[in-house]
Structures are given as structure tokens and as C-alpha cells.
Image (tube, helix red, strand yellow):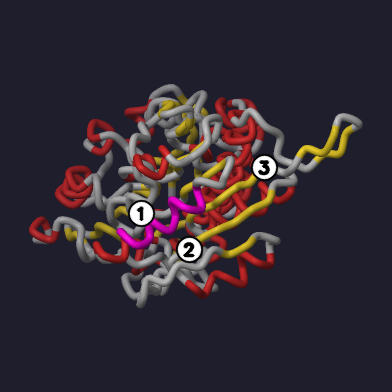
Amino acid sequence: MKIVVPRECHQGERRVALIPDDVERLVRKGIEVAVEASAGSGAGCPDEAYRSVGAEVSTRREHMLAAADLVVGVRSLPAEDLARLRDGCLSIGFLDPFQASGLIEQMRSRGISAISMELIPRSTRAQKMDALSSQASLAGYVAVILAAEALDKIFPMMTTPAGTIFPARVFVLGAGVAGLQAIATAKRLGARVEAYDTRPAVEEQVKSLGARFVKIDLGDTGETRQGYARALSGDQLDRQQEALATVCAQADVVITTAQVFGRQAPRLITAQSLNRMRPGSVVVDLAVERGGNVEGSETDRIVETGGVRIIGLANLPGRVAAHASQVYSSNLFHLIGECLDEGKPRLRLDLNHEVLGPCLVTHQGRILYEGINPSANR
């Protein structure tokens, strides 16, 4: 069995799918691992580190992909690389299945099996493989650091001979993994933190981190089976936006993390809300790649409106590539273990497997996941 780790092609992507420590563990299982030259350089993993643990390091990308039984990546392979994989090869990564239906169809038609890391179930058994959560946690941390750098105030309270500096007020929208980490990081920096989520069940988690939970009566909300917030109705969105605008007007920093599984991110902060914020305030939109929670946010840009800075930088985990790669590699290592035939160095994909079943998007010429271009499921 041969696992291939190609260099990421997405512009600005510095993460690598497997770090040398986990490659060494795979090699000890009798698995051959090939790494494309410079694949780990952006994450602090030089080629020599891979060679020293028994991996092959090669510049011949096309030949590596053609010989692979399993290709692991952070993001999906481009179409030209998918064309080089042989029938029956398994590809694992963040495939963006709801937006990249063309690539999913190409995998189906080529007989490639594909596991989408976004679809790893949120279960006890799958916790070690939950890459969406591991990367979101880092994104929440980075969002606060970016906000602290952009804000023209300090976060903590400080008593000086010239008087007392009051703590910055941070408002976090969405108390999922990214939101909770943002709350914790802002509190550690000394800010006064408030948070909001449509799911009342997360109130205790927010309070346990020392933040105040903002309550907005929207009627029946709840969450999906995967643990994500459900989409709100139009009337609920209107009420939510008005209530959030009042809180945002008092905040120095607003961090939005709200995303709906498989759908465009909800618009939470309108232009009217931004107009009510004080000049010098900062907004960080973690959902910018999914349409954005903030009106006017732009992917990979910092824009200013009425004196309010809106940070819409994409791929925040990639800004801490070393640690992002470390946790993602661990997620992959444990997932690969589930793909092996009773621990032997060969693949065995069980459609009824409680972890693999839900995240296996294509297999044996079929699209398996409901809601992804079902007309192509032939």
C-alpha cells in the first residue's frame, strides 16, 4: 500500500497533510509513504525530516500520483491531478463537496473513492478524526490575534499613574468550536467578552469561559444532527440582526463565526449595524469564504467602512501552519487507521462503518452522500 502526500496547489496554502512524526508511525505499520518535495516546507517540515523517517521524497508528482493507493491532502486535488489517479484510488481531504460538484463528478466517473473531511461525524469514536473542529479551533484563536493587532486599543484593563484603561469589549457571534476558542483567547488577553448563538444549549459553555451570553428570543431554533446551527427563517433573521446591532454598537471588536452546514453563511451584521459601531472598531468575518456574516466583507482583504475595519482574511488556520498541520496530520493518521483491513497495510472501505460511511462521498463509480449533485449518481 502506498500513501502519497502531494504539495498543496491552492494559492497561499502552507499546511501539509502529514507531518514526519505521523509518517513514521505509518511506515512502522508497513505502509509505503511518498512525499512530494517541499510539501511540508511551509509548515516547518523539511524534506530531510521525511527522508529520516523512511518516506520517499520525490519531485515527480505525476508518477507519484499514478502509483498511489491513497492520496492525502489538506484540500482537494485539482482536476488535472485527479486525471492521473488510477481506478480504485482513495483521496482524502477537505473536498468542499457542496461547492465543488464538478470535481466530485470527476472522481465518480474515474472510479476514485473520496473521503471529505468536512463530513466526519461528530461522535465519540470520530473525535480524533474531526479535522473540521481542530482547524476551526485554530481559526478562532487567529481571529482574536488579528483583531488585537488591528484594534487601536489594548485588550486588558490597565491601571496607570495617568488613570485606568478599561478593557476592550469583544462580541463573538457563534459559539461553535471557533467561537468558543475566540472567547477563551479574548478572555486570556483580558477583554470583556460577550457571545451569542442561536442554540440555547451552548449558554453554559459560554459562561464557563467567563463570557456573558447574549439572549435573543427568536422562537424555535435548535441544531442539526451534526451539531450545527439550523438555518433561521426570514423573520427570525430580521429580529436577530436588529438585536445584534445593538450589542455591536457597544463593542470594540466583533468576531463572527456563524456557518450553516452545507449552505451559504447567514448575514448577521448589516451595513446599518456597521454604521452604529464606533470608528476604530474591528470586525473579523470567519465565514467570509462562505459568503460572509458581514455585509461588505471581502475575501482576503481588510476593508474600512465608516472607520470600522472589516477583516475578511481566508484560511486562518493556514496562518499557523505548523500547529494546523500537526493536528490535521493526527486527524488523518487516525482516519487512515479506520480505512485499513484489520490493521493490515491494505485498504478496506466499509460503507456501513460508523465513521467512514457518513464521510465517504464517492465509491465504486457512485456518489454516496445525499445532497451532492444526485443526478450524477448513476
Amino acid type at circle 3 is Ala
Quadrant hosting residue 71? top left
Amino acid type at circle 1 is Ser
In 3D space, how far apart are the residues under numbered discs 2 and 3 (Cα atoms)? 21 Å
- Visible in this render: residue 355? yes
- The single residue placed furthest to the right in the displayed view is 161
Q: Secondary structure at mark 1?
A: strand
Depth check, front residue: 230 or 215: 215
Instruction: Residue under label 1, please give it.
Output: 116
Horizontally, residue 30 falls left or right of residue 95, namely right
Q: Secondary structure at mark 3?
A: loop
Q: Tell me which residue sits at (66%, 33%) in the image.
A: 52
Task: Provide the residue span drawn in magenta.
Answer: 238-248
Q: Nearer the viewer, mark 3 or mark 1?
A: 3
Instruction: Give the label on residue 168, or none.
Output: 3
Q: Are marks 2 and 1 in contact (CB under 8 Å)?
A: no
Q: Give the number of callouts.
A: 3
Amino acid type at circle 2 is Asp
Instruction: Give the label on residue 92, or none.
Output: none
In 3D space, how far apart are the residues under numbered discs 3 and 1 (Cα atoms)? 39 Å
Q: Nearer the viewer, mark 2 or mark 1?
A: 2
Instruction: Residue under label 2, please give it.
Output: 197
Q: Are marks 2 and 3 in contact (CB under 8 Å)?
A: no
Residue 375 lies in the magenta stretch: no
Horizontally, residue 361 falls left or right of residue 333, namely left
